Amino acid sequence: MRVWSQSHITLTTNNKTMITIEWIEIKTSAKGSKYAKASVKDETGKTIDGVTIFGTFPKFDEIQPGSSVEGTIKTGEYMGKPQYTLEAKPAPRAGGAGFAGAAVRKEQSIAKAQDKKEEGIKIASTMNKAVDIAIAESTGKTGYSFEERITYWRQWLYTHWDDEMKPF
């Protein structure tokens, strides 16, 4: 268990809430999680005793008396007594241009996947039909290279896949 005590001047920068740690005691919960009980001073100079700082607070292990951290003090009540918790400022959420960029990348990925799917269908279909045509051609013929006819028909079908044909 660490126990420190020290006074310090509170800092204010860029309209952010700076909390100064005046005293801190590191503890371990029954479940083994680290947390701290502290006496803190906010930007207005108001001292609040018994503030809980959970181990998930950014740079928790570096907090000591005299250090200033950015955060907000949340007030609650437990069994009729006021409870104070120091919480970190929330990180900015992705949005705006970042979201638009993600949407464009997703659209491009979908288009790419569709192109690959169409190419796969084209390859499989031309091979299947080339074999069918070669089998149909070979009926009753001799001196015939089956592999050559499959290759010929596959190339022909692949080349003419996108030809526009008018319906009958």
Image (cartoon, rainbow, N blue to C red):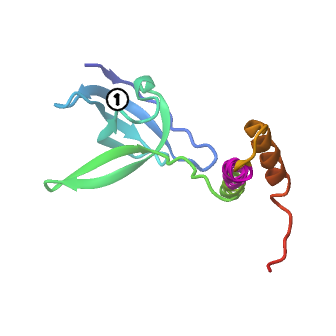
Residue 10 is one of the magenta-drawn residues: no
Q: Residue lying furthest left in this view?
A: 79
Residue 107, image x and y in percent? 69, 57
Q: Amino acid at mark 1?
A: Trp
Q: Measuring 74% from the left and 37% from the top, which residue is drawn there?
A: 147
Q: Measuring 72% from the left and 47% from the top, which residue is drawn there?
A: 138
Asked if residue 123 can be seen in this view, the reply is no
Q: In what quadrant of the picture does the C terminus appear?
A: bottom right
- In the image, is residue 127 above or below residue 143? below
Q: How many marks?
A: 1
Magenta-colored segment: predominant secondary structure:
helix
- In the image, is residue 140 above or below residue 23? below
The one nearer the camera, 17 or 138, is: 138
Left or right side of 67 for 136: right
Asked if residue 92 can be seen in this view, the reply is yes
Q: Secondary structure at mark 1?
A: strand
User: Where does the magenta region start and end?
Assistant: 112-137
Q: In what quadrant of the picture does the N terminus appear?
A: top left
Q: Measuring 13% from the left and 54% from the top, which residue is drawn there?
A: 79
The residue labelled by disc 1 is: 23
